[in-house]
Each structure stands twice: as C-alpha cells, then as structure tokens.
Amino acid sequence: RDARRSSFFQGSSSSSGLMEDIPSDELNMRKFCSEEKWPMELPLWLKLLLRLNSWLTIRRDGYPHRTMSRLIDRRVGPKERDGIAAQDVVIDRETGVWVRVFRPETTTTTLGSGGIGAAAPLVFYFHGGGFTLFSASSILADSFARYLAREFSAVVVSLDYRKTPEFRYPAAYEDGVAALGWAVSNLDPSVSGKCESGVCESGPLRGADLSKCFLVGESAGGNIAHHVAARVATATASF
C-alpha cells in the first residue's frame, strides 16, 4: 500500500493514466503533503503551551475554569486599530449575544464615493475555543477579524456566541443563525425597507453587500460555520 501511495504521489509510469485526470494544483498539494520534510507534528514548545493552557483553564471534572481563562485570555475593546474601525452591537437582548463589526476606516457613509464601496463582501467570523473559551473581544479573534477586513476590504462580523457548559448544544449554532438573521433584517430591502439592492448607506453594516456573504471560522468556529450554513440553506422561509 505504501508503494502504491508513493508512486501515486510521485506520478510514476504505473499510475500515469490515473494522474492525467487529476488537476495539477491538487497534484502539487498531494506531493507537498507526502514529502518527509513536511512537519507532521507540532513543535515541542507549542505542545507544552497547549498543555499548560489546558491544565490552567480546564478543571478535573472537564468544566472550564472561568477565572483562570480570563487571566490568560487578553481582551481588547472596539477601538480603531491598524486602519480598521470596530463597533460592538447587541443583536439579541434576550440572550445577550453580540457581535463586533469591523470595517476599513476608509469606508464612507456615502456608497460609491471612495473606500470599500458598495460591493464590500460581508464576512461572518466564528472564533475557536472548544465551544467553551475565548470571545469576540479576545485579542487573537479581534486581530484576525481586523486582518480579514483589511486584506479583503470587507465588513467583518465577529460573533460572540454563547459558550458551553452554561449554554448547551445547539446554542452556538442558534446564535450563528441569529447573527445572519440580524444581517438580513438590516440589509435585505424586502425586510428592512431601507436598503437598496441589499446595500445600506447607514447602520453598523453600511457598505456591506448581502449578496457577497461568507462564513469563516477556525476550530470550533469552523464547525459552527458549517452547521450555520447548513441550517440557513434549509431555512428558505427565513432567508
């Protein structure tokens, strides 16, 4: 099996017919992943750091240690930084769920007069943390959302979803769907009655184009992005 795998990655004559059907970019990725020099394991220092973080923030019974996690988790406010403005908005007063909206500071309130313009992508970002830790105000989540807004000239909505075990499954998924519903209520002209063609000139999502919506997340956030997309795709009556 290893011999067949090696010949497949390297494109030997025995598998040339099969290789012709595979795009070159995929072949390059497979070859890259098969090289022995590619680091398959995390560095020792990173393993130790992750183990220390787990030891400090997770109790023996499996529940998160909120006090310790807050000491390790550095939080930042919604200030203008690195050319990106930020604003915190509560989207559901009943649950207390809120989002941090990021936009390049060159964005203007009048669309088409400069800045990111009327065609700015709308990116929803879900941070990681095992469904239990971190926040949209954590410095890592805040910095990455600013990176997305800056690099892609996008309006980025970072969701501070409810965490387990205080809020059980599927609370995080429901909060993600609620965030998209909040965006629709603000941008969809058939719902809001104040935006033209899904683009608003005012409000926290001004300049964002609802037709160019993307969901992004890492770790637990990637899981949330997937399930939110699946739920929204089947909720045709609401979206």
Image: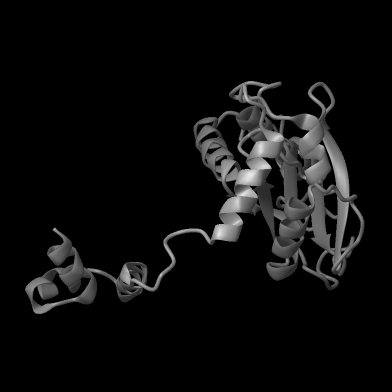
Disc tally is 0
Instruction: Inspect this view and state whether residue 154 appears.
Output: no
Residue 196 shown left or right of residue 172 in the figure: right
**Residue shown at 79%/23% (left/top)?**
95
How was the colour assigned to the protein in this rendering? one colour
**Residue 12: x and y, percent?**
14, 77
Q: Residue furthest left?
A: 14
**Residue shown at 75%/67% (left/top)?**
150
Is residue 99 placed above or below 113 in the rendered structure?
Answer: above
**Residue 202: x and y, percent?**
88, 51
Rendering quarter of residue 36: bottom left
**Residue 81: x and y, percent?**
88, 64
Name the quarter where the C terminus is drawn.
top right
Rendering quarter of residue 105: bottom right
Is residue 124 placed above or below 63 in the rendered structure?
Answer: below
Residue 14 shown left or right of residue 41 in the figure: left
Instruction: Inspect this view and state whether residue 124 appears.
Output: yes
